Amino acid sequence: MTLSDGDSDSYTFVSDLQKQSSNRSVSASRSITNLSRPALTLNKFDPTLGILQSVRISGNVAFSRSVGSVSVFCRDDGLINSSCASSSASQSSSGNTRIDNPFDGSGFGTSFNTLISPTQFADLIGTGTFVVPWQVTLSHFAQASCTPSALTDITSCDVSARTTFNFSASASITYTYMTPPPPPPAVPLPASGLLLLGGLAAMGLRRRKG
């Protein structure tokens, strides 16, 4: 027989970069390294169900991002939205997520699918849960530059950019176990056997009276 359990989690991070510069070029950046997320939890095996035969655990992570707009704002002595002859802006981003197999000692990776050794069954039998950790890493960079027009003296430019990062993780475990067979039913004695037992009982009663 088999018994399965699973858990999943997702995480969205909206990175808004905004920076004001004192010159005609500006850059802004953000990075988050190994941000731990709440661990996934899986149920242990209830030993009252039967005898555990095999255990398989798996985990996967995924990452995607949605790149938004990047904008340039020109300034002339502190006045925003002054006229720019030209401006340019760009942004870049990256991210990944990792999940840990708590039973093979390999540390964090992008996925795993492992048959657990019987020597580790003791860690999985009982009440309660055990954890499968996962982490997130992301970076976001934006830059902009602006050129003054003939009618205004641009003193600086600002940059504003947004990227949405989406991360997800899932883990599952499957227990294969055997249910012990029930004890065999009692076999009734045939009628001749019952008569024999009755006769022996009667003989014993007469001897006690004698």
Image (cartoon, helix red, strand yellow):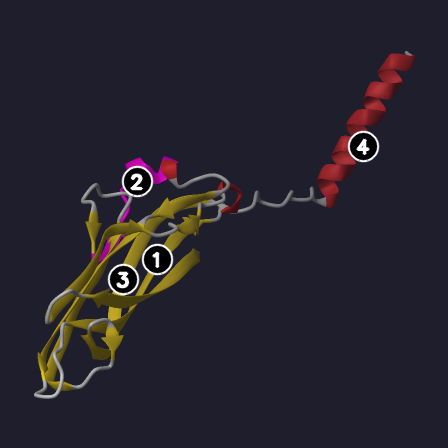
Front position in the image: 171 or 187 = 171
Q: Residues at badges 2 and 4 in contact (C-beta under 8 Å)?
A: no
Judge whether residue 113 is colored magenta.
Answer: yes
Residues at marks 4 and 3, CA–CA distance in whole angstroms: 74 Å
Foreground pick, 26 / 137: 26
Mark 4 lies on residue: 198
Q: Taking 188 as reference, is 201 above or below it? A: above
Amino acid type at image mark 1: Ala
Please tell me whether mark 2 or mark 4 is closer to you in this view: 2
Residue 27 x, y percent position in the rendering? 14, 66
Q: Position of residue 59 (x, y in %)?
A: 29, 57
Q: Which mark is residue 61?
A: 3
Left or right of 162 in this view: 148: left
Instruction: Work out whether mark 2 precedes mark 4 in sequence or the reverse, and give the earlier one.
Output: 2
Sequence order check, earlier mark of 4 and 3:
3
Residue located beneath label 1 in the image:
171
Vertical placement of residue 101 versus 78, above or below:
above
Stretch of the chain drawn in magenta:
110-122
Separation of residues labelled 3 and 2 (CA atoms): 26 Å
- Tell me how far mark 4 sits from mark 1, CA to CA: 66 Å
Instruction: Using the image, determine if residue 156 lies above or below residue 177.
Output: below
Number of residues whose C-alpha sits closer than 10 Å to that of mark 3, classed few (under 14), some (14–19) or many (20 or more): many
Task: Give, as a three-letter code, the residue at label 4.
Answer: Gly
State the SS at label 3: strand
The residue carrying pointer 1 sits among few (fewer than 14), some (14 to 19) or many (20 or more) residues within 10 Å by Cα, namely: many
Ranked by sequence position, the earlier of labels 3 and 2 is 3
Q: Mark 2 packing: few (<14 Cα in 10 Å), some, or many (20+)?
A: few
N-terminal of the pair, mark 2 or mark 1, is 2
Q: Which residue is mark 2?
A: 118
Q: Earlier in the sequence, mark 4 or mark 1?
A: 1
Marks 3 and 2 close (CB-CB < 8 Å): no
